Amino acid sequence: MSQAFGLALLVLGGLAAIGAPIALSMVTAAVFYLFLAGQDMSLASEQFIQAVYDSTLLLAVPLFIAAANIMNVGAISDRLLEFCKAMVGRFKGGMAQVDILVSLIFSGMSGSAVADAAGVGQVTIKMMLKTGHYTPGFAGAVVAASATIGPIIPPSIPMVLYALVSNTSIGYLFLGGVVPGLMMTLALMAMTSVIAHRRGIPAEEAVPLRQIPGVTLRAMPALMLPVILLGGIYGGATTPTEAAAVAALYALVVSALWYRSLSLKSLYGVFVDSARSSASVGLVIGSALIFNYVVAAERIPETLSQFMVSLDLSRGGFLAFTMVLFLFLGFFLDATTIILVVIPLFLPTAMALGIDPVHFGVVSVVNCMIGLITPPYGILLFVVNGTTGIPIKAIVRESVPFLIALLLSLVAIALFPELVLWLPRLFGYEG
């Protein structure tokens, strides 16, 4: 590691420590490195432009963001809530179970944990608190924990980013996330049931069986979106980016024409919010890839790979090491930064040890999603706190059992790669 790179890391750490945005910190550190190394500082702009504008895959990110925002504003979320209440509201801890199932279904549309927590999660918290059976902290913890499912079940914005840095098929990554996402859902529902029995939280009034077909029919346009999205990708009709455009258009048509719940005024607000969110994500992506140029110039991935291989770690040992490291980094960094900056450092080692890139990608993304509910930088904790006013301390205290359930799911998918690779191989993956 050169002196210039060491000083650049100090700049990056210093700016982050005083609260500067991570995108600004990485760009400043990269430009500082180029200056000290005597390289053309315009390389930073060149890398940014090439990274953001030359990748059609990245276009999927703002489209998925727009689709999620449309569904939050339209009546799609309301129909999903009605359907999920009919399905699982009759069980112990009914409204909490409803939120988890809604997160599972909604995740098949948005690919964003934040969209889940800020949108439909806000509604389910109000419904839980209205019953009087749930503490605010518990309601907030359920919503934050279940929102982590969003980027695991396809579509997934974090997996799009992993595909960008690893050159892995986004289609097979999406498929690889299905079984782990279902496992996380079942683990959270089981933990909710245990807590509900201990605290005496009752079930909701059961929806009569004769009404379920009608509830399902009303929710059918919303339930069809994941089918259309994944069917287009795996049927060969669309690329993942084109599928994201179809998802956004379908959400718009269903909200505006079928449910008639989207006005021109609210649509304008959706586009403004989507543009802001996309710009924020784009800045982080661009700045991370600029910094990755610096890392590559220093040959850090190759050096790290040689060092890790020299330790003679087994596949399991390497996965255990990276899992603990990514969980630790999740205390301080957002998931996007870990995926774009940190994970590429370990990809060469993973490949050298024969670890499948789809398996490694899904395990890594699950790691990063768990980091979204760990303090002090758990972004989902801040989202729930900001939208509901529930104290973060109360959410953190109640989220511990759900964190344990998610960690057990993570260990299972790390130990048994077939849980990730079975579905991709069913569709022709040869990794």
Image (spheres, rainbow, N blue to C red):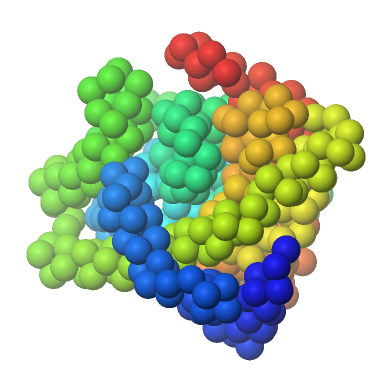
Residue 277 location, quadrant: bottom left
Q: Is residue 301 above or below residue 229?
A: below
Toward the viewer: 319 or 114?
Answer: 319
Residue 211 position within the rendered picture, expressed as x and y whole percent measured from the top left:
35, 31
Q: Is residue 393 visible?
A: yes
* Quadrant position of the N terminus in the picture: bottom right
Q: Residue at x 86, y 38 (%)?
A: 310
Q: Is residue 354 above or below residue 89?
A: above
Toward the viewer: 132 or 83?
Answer: 83
Q: Residue furthest bottom?
A: 18
| Circle count | 0
Toward the viewer: 136 or 317?
Answer: 317
Left or right of 425? Residue 410 is right
Residue 247 position within the rendered picture, expressed as x and y whole percent measured from the top left:
26, 41
Q: Residue at x 58, y 78 (%)?
A: 36
Toward the viewer: 39 or 244?
Answer: 39
Residue 340 location, quadrant: bottom right
Q: Is residue 387 visible?
A: no
Residue 96 position within the rendered picture, expressed as x and y whole percent measured from the top left:
59, 50
Left or right of 330? Residue 269 is left
Q: Residue furthest front?
A: 38
Residue 353 location, quadrant: top right
Q: Residue at x 13, y 51 (%)?
A: 256
Left or right of 210? Residue 10 is right
Q: Residue at x 63, y 81 (%)?
A: 11
Residue 194 position within the rendered picture, expressed as x and y whole percent measured from the top left:
77, 43
* Quadrant position of the C terminus in the picture: top right
